[in-house]
Amino acid sequence: MRLKALHHVRFQVCDLDEQERFGTDFGLVTAERTPDRLVMRTRGGDQCAYVAIKGDSDKFIGLGFEVDDAASLDEAVTDLGASAVEDLDLPGGGKSVSLIDPDGNTVMLVHGVMRGDAGDAYPELLLNTPFEKRRFGRNQYGRERGPARLWRIGHIGLFVKSFHASTEWYARNLGLVGSDIYHIPGQPQAQIVGFFRMDRGEEYVDHHVVAFMQDERGGCHHISFEAQDFEAQQRTHRYLGSKAYESIWGVGRHPHGSHVFDVWRAPDGARFETFSDTDLFRKDHGTNIHDISQVVMDEWSDDEPTRYFA
Ligand SMILES: [Fe+2]
């Protein structure tokens, strides 16, 4: 089977009102709201990217990937032991099956979802540099300082109880391929963190669709949505700060994957990230292995990302 994209993430949340307020300020758009469920989308044409079910505690439930064809759903039932194919009860419809990963997270495979219309992008930045002038006789077109315009859900970070067991499961069942993997200093076999991408053969995909971090807590580490560019991220960073939300880390740039990141705390405690300008790789790019002590995590600062891992 071939994964097409991350489709949605699913959480249980105590206070849907607070979560919807944050999601809206962060840049998501409410697609459905009932007393028991909040569904939010991006402006990129998806009808669903974030799902919160009302419950008596805040916790991660699972994630869903869109797959290339309906046959992949049947294949998952017969070959991987997935649940029977059923209608997907989310905006956009489609069919789905469910698997359970080694940590008990629900992993849905989805096909046949309807997409909506994409929203308007900001005019592209025309940057004047010392070497090239591209903008004449006008200023940068104005943009609001407010919620980001987000275009898709791009990746998820998972705390996993066993890095080996989880990455082996996602590679074997869903075809994920390591892009950059990190081991304990001096112990190349002791891998503990890794960024994994989809296998779409010759097609270029994001540097990672899932990041795995070995941590006994399990659950979700962060979810990440693509912003248009770092100008949009900076403006949203200031806006979220003005609303007194908790900034966790950023704005910065990761060395591996290259993406500009900005991470914030949602009311349920989950980390929400915007990213832009990520690297693209194909299947044949292979996997890079690193000693974790040698890796700079943010090229723009030496800020200790204590809240990022707390
Ligand atoms: Fe991320």
Image (cartoon, helix red, strand yellow):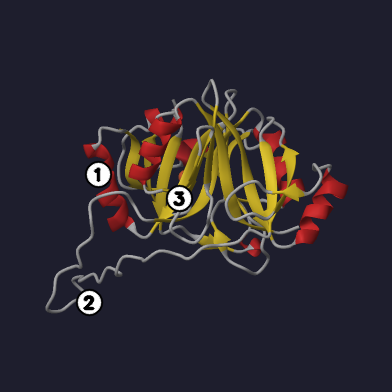
Q: How far is the residue under mark 1 from the one under mark 2? A: 31 Å
Element at badge 1?
helix
Left or right: 39, with 191 as reference point: left
**In this figure, which residue is indicated by the disc labeled 2?**
132
Amino acid carrying label 1: it is: Tyr
| Depicted 309 relative to depicted 204: above or below | above
- Residue 175 position, x and y percent, is 72, 52
Dot 3 falls on a residue whose secondary structure is strand
Q: Which residue is drawn at 73% across and 42% down?
A: 98
- The percent position of residue 35, horizontal first and vertical second, equals 50, 33
Amino acid type, callout 3: Phe
Q: Distance between the residues labelled 2 and 3?
A: 31 Å
| Disc on the earlier residue, 1 or 2 | 2
The type of residue carrying mark 2 is: Glu
Circle 3 residue: 225
- Whether 281 is drawn above or below 42: the answer is below
Where 105 sits versus 89, above or below?
above
Quadrant the C terminus occupies: top left
Q: Name the residue under label 1.
A: 239
The answer to whether the residues at label 1 and label 3 have Cβ atoms under 8 Å apart is no
Q: Toward which corner of the image does residue 301 lie, by quadrant? A: top left
For the question of whether residue 210 can be seen, the reply is no
The answer to whether residue 184 is above or below residue 117 is: above
Report x, y in % for residue 119: 40, 64
* Circle nearer the N terminus (1, 3): 3
Task: Compare marks 2 and 3 and give the one earlier in the sequence.
Answer: 2
Label 1 Cα crowd, 10 Å radius (few <14 / some 14-19 / many 20+): some
Which label number is shown at residue 134?
none
